[in-house]
Image (cartoon, grey):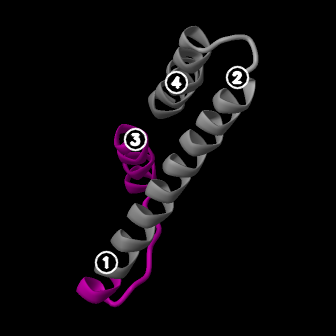
């Protein structure tokens, strides 16, 4: 739940700050910031989940998907953006 609250806050910060400093015709820039925020979180989430799955498979021989690593990856992607 905390990850999703932070993720929502990023939408207020990234596109919101763009709209705060831009003139009236720059809604496209805010939309691009929103898309970049979404893609960064999604890429971080998928990368972390599959990296952990591959490492777990090499360690134990079983493939598992860890939602905790998925959420940590999403936060990492948001911080990276």
Main SS, magenta region, reads: helix
Q: Earlier in the sequence, mark 2 or mark 3?
A: 2
Q: CA distance from mark 4 to mark 3?
A: 11 Å
Q: Secondary structure at mark 3?
A: helix
Q: Quadrant of residue 49?
A: bottom left
Residue at left offset 57%, top offset 18%:
12
User: Do tag 2 and tag 1 residues touch (Cβ < 8 Å)?
Assistant: no
User: Do tag 3 and tag 1 residues touch (Cβ < 8 Å)?
Assistant: no
Report whether 55 appears left or right of 46: left
Judging by the rendered image, the residue that carries numbered circle 4 is 5
Give whichever of 31, 70 is nearer the camera. 31
Residue at left offset 57%, top offset 9%:
20
Q: Secondary structure at mark 1?
A: helix
Judging by the rendered image, the residue that carries numbered circle 2 is 26
User: Do tag 2 and tag 3 residues touch (Cβ < 8 Å)?
Assistant: no
Give whichever of 38, 19 is nearer the camera. 19
Seen as rendered, the residue at the extreme left is 59
Q: Earlier in the sequence, mark 2 or mark 1?
A: 2
**What is the x, y in percent for residue 25?**
76, 18
Which mark is in front, 2 or 4? 2
């Amino acid at each position: 739940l905390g990850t999703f609250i932070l993720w929502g806050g990023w939408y207020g910060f990234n596109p919101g700050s763009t709209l705060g400093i831009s003139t009236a015709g720059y809604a496209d820039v805010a939309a691009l910031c929103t898309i970049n925020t979404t893609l960064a979180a999604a890429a971080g989430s998928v990368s972390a989940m599959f990296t952990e799955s591959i490492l777990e498979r090499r360690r134990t021989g079983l493939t598992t998907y860890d939602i905790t690593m998925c959420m940590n990856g999403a936060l990492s992607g948001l911080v990276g953006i």
